Amino acid sequence: MTSLKYLGGYPPALLDKVRQLIERDELGDYLQRRHPTRHDVQSDKALYAYANALRQEHLRHSPGIDRVWYDSKLDVIQRALGLHTAISHVHGGRLKARKEIRIASLFRETAPEFLQMIVVHELAHLKEPEHNKAFYQLCEYMQPDYHQQELDLRLHLTWRDVLAARNA
């Protein structure tokens, strides 16, 4: 049986439903019905434009983003689907900070809702560094169905593990 490591903290009743979908080999079909398309944001340049457009739409007064890119080194196992960093360095007599967002490369091949969810998540960290109530309210503001998309993404990651286990 595949571990439900991406679904920690969800209610037992939901976990039982997920196990049943896996046992009946229906989880993939469920995800395909809910998320039938793939996005076309394939390059780092397009990803930067996508993230910056979301920032402009929802967080106009937040600091700009210096760089956004797909990172093949992010480890999904360690739950790093995306990272945000603020790198500070002295330039002349001034301290400069660069805001960067890295998105796991697996998001090149996912539904548009999943890419939006992870970018929204990382953008929210520009204003709220902790995963607290204000952080999740900001995520919901930027993507009203954020929590459902996060659950579906976690189901997608679980399904990837199921397929990998079958092919091993």
Image (spheres, helix red, strand yellow):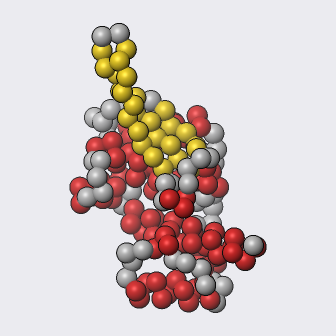
How many marks do you count on the picture? 0
| Quadrant containing the N terminus in the rendered view | bottom right
The residue shown at (57%, 67%) is 157
The residue shown at (37%, 75%) is 9
122 up-or-down from 63: above or below: below
Residue 91 is situated, as x and y percent measured from the top left of the image, at 37, 14
Residue 129 is situated, as x and y percent measured from the top left of the image, at 29, 47
The residue shown at (48%, 50%) is 82
| Quadrant containing the C terminus in the rendered view | bottom right
Q: Is residue 66 visible?
A: yes
For residue 112, which quarter of the picture? Answer: bottom right
For residue 86, which quarter of the picture? Answer: top left
Find the residue positioned furthest to the top: 92
Is residue 24 left or right of 48 when viewed as pictured? right
39 up-or-down from 37: above or below: above
Find the residue positioned furthest to the left: 134
Nearest the viewer among 87 and 20 is: 87
Nearest the viewer among 44 and 5 is: 5
The residue shown at (44%, 36%) is 100
Q: Is residue 112 visible?
A: no
87 up-or-down from 139: above or below: above
Is residue 19 left or right of 119 when viewed as pictured? right
Residue 30 is situated, as x and y percent measured from the top left of the image, at 59, 78
Is residue 135 left or right of 20 when viewed as pictured? left
